[in-house]
Image (tube, rainbow, N blue to C red):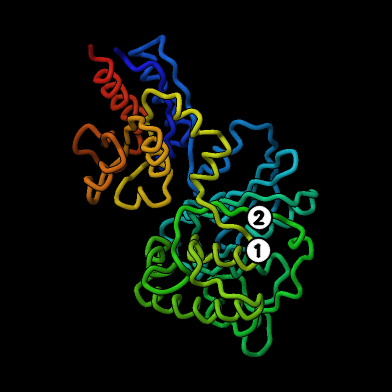
Amino acid sequence: MPFMKFVLAPDSFKGSLSSIEVSQAMKQAIRAVLPDTETRAIPMADGGEGTTEALAASIPHEKISFPCTGPLGEESTGWYVKTEDRAIIEGAAIAGLPLVPKDKRNPDHTTSYGIGQAIRHALDEGLRDFIIAIGGSSTNDGGLGMLQALGIKALDGNRQAAGIFGKDLHNVEHMDFTTIDPRVSEATIQVACDVDNPLTGKSGASHVYGRQKGATTEQILAYDQALSCYGKLVEEAVGHPLMDQKGAGAAGGLGFAFLALGGILTSGAQLVGEAVQLEEAVRHADLVITGEGQSDDQTLYGKAPGYIAELCHRHKKPVILLSGSLDGDIEKLNDRFTACFSIVPGPRTLDDCLDHAEAYVKQATTQIVRLFNHK
């Protein structure tokens, strides 16, 4: 007896396919084998690239463009989504790592300033309800640039204004929150993130994520120390401890900066899942297929497929994980997923995998459906 109701809820395959493109490729493959089956595509995200797209897919919205400072300090054009009464901002679209060429990735030279500009632009539009996805940033500035864009003063030892880049974090000796745009206090800010790291230490922003942003070993150590000093200044300014809260180290410390603004850090996958009513779809599914570009032990901790697997486990539904690559302890993944597969059919170069990702998703989905359709 073949499965009749499929729920397709993949995350993006970063660098190749959006979550919408992945889910559509899966849907086409299923329809080719079972043309009369019921398939529901629910593109997912977990606070990084594609979160805005996933959140806005099912609700009326307007894409707003605005002039901003790009991640390298260049003049740029940013965007966010405006619904009837809410702004949905994706940090990766403004200060994301993919926006920085590989040969220029260096946390000394990147800034989160443009994200603060996006918030101010939305405030100017009259919006006071925010969802901000912060994953995938190119920065390690602790949100220094973003806070400055909102009017907060960061001063060096000579009481001069500090710059907006990561390198300027090392010189900050005073933080003044009294100059913040007063409209921020009127806002409700939900922050979608996919990690629960503290700001500093071996599990903090610099040590865990600094390398992928271009930091050397020496820079990682220096940034961890700088974030510790900066964090204490911010805590003193706002009057309560924040550095050790879960998610403070997300996006190079942007999570910490949003906590200082009174933001509420939420699992990005859970936030998106609740917005698109994923649990209700899972409840009525016969098979759920999810996926992501690379899967390992971290998939179970805050990533969209891990969240989906938990929902399926709760409702006793089979769930398949399709990934661009599988790494780490597969047995840990098997504790939550019914089965895990790489979409790559054999030894391939990275360029080949990226160029043919859609075809590989279709091939892998076809084989899974053929198996489950076997009588």
Q: Which residue is mark 1?
A: 262
Task: Please state if 6 lies on the left or on the right of 138 as rendered.
Answer: left
The residues tagged by marks 1 and 2 sit, at their Cα atoms, a distance apart of 7 Å
Which element type, helix, strand or loop, lies under badge 1?
Answer: loop
Task: Please state if 352 lies on the left or on the right of 18 as rendered.
Answer: left
State the residue in front, 287 or 55.
287
Which element type, helix, strand or loop, lies under badge 2?
Answer: strand
Which disc is residue 189 wearing?
Answer: 2
At label 1, counting other C-alpha atoms closer than 10 Å, the crowd grade (few under 14, some 14-19, many 20 or more) is some
Work out whether mark 1 precedes mark 2 in sequence or the reverse, and give the earlier one. Answer: 2
Which disc is residue 326 wearing?
Answer: none
Q: Is there any visible trace of residue 356 in the rendered image?
A: no
Instruction: Using the image, determine if residue 115 lies above or below residue 145.
Output: above
At label 2, counting other C-alpha atoms closer than 10 Å, the crowd grade (few under 14, some 14-19, many 20 or more) is many
Residue 307, percent across and down?
42, 43
Instruction: Using the image, determine if residue 90 lies above or below residue 160.
Output: above
Identify the residue at image location x=66%, y=42%.
81
Residue 14, percent across and down?
41, 43
The amino acid beneath tag 2 is Ile
Instruction: Using the image, determine if residue 38 lies above or below residue 142.
Output: above
Task: Please state if 109 lies on the left or on the right of 305 as rendered.
Answer: right
- Residues at circles 1 and 2 in contact by the CB criterion of under 8 Å: yes
Q: Quadrant of residue 213?
A: bottom left
Residue 305, percent across and down?
39, 41
Instruction: Using the image, determine if residue 109 lies above or below residue 16.
Output: below
Q: Look at the image and tell me in which quarter the C terminus lies.
A: top left
The amino acid beneath tag 1 is Gly
State the residue in front, 374 or 157.
374
Identify the residue at image location x=21%, y=45%.
331
Residue 299, percent across and down?
35, 48
Q: Is there any visible trace of residue 118 in the rendered image?
A: yes
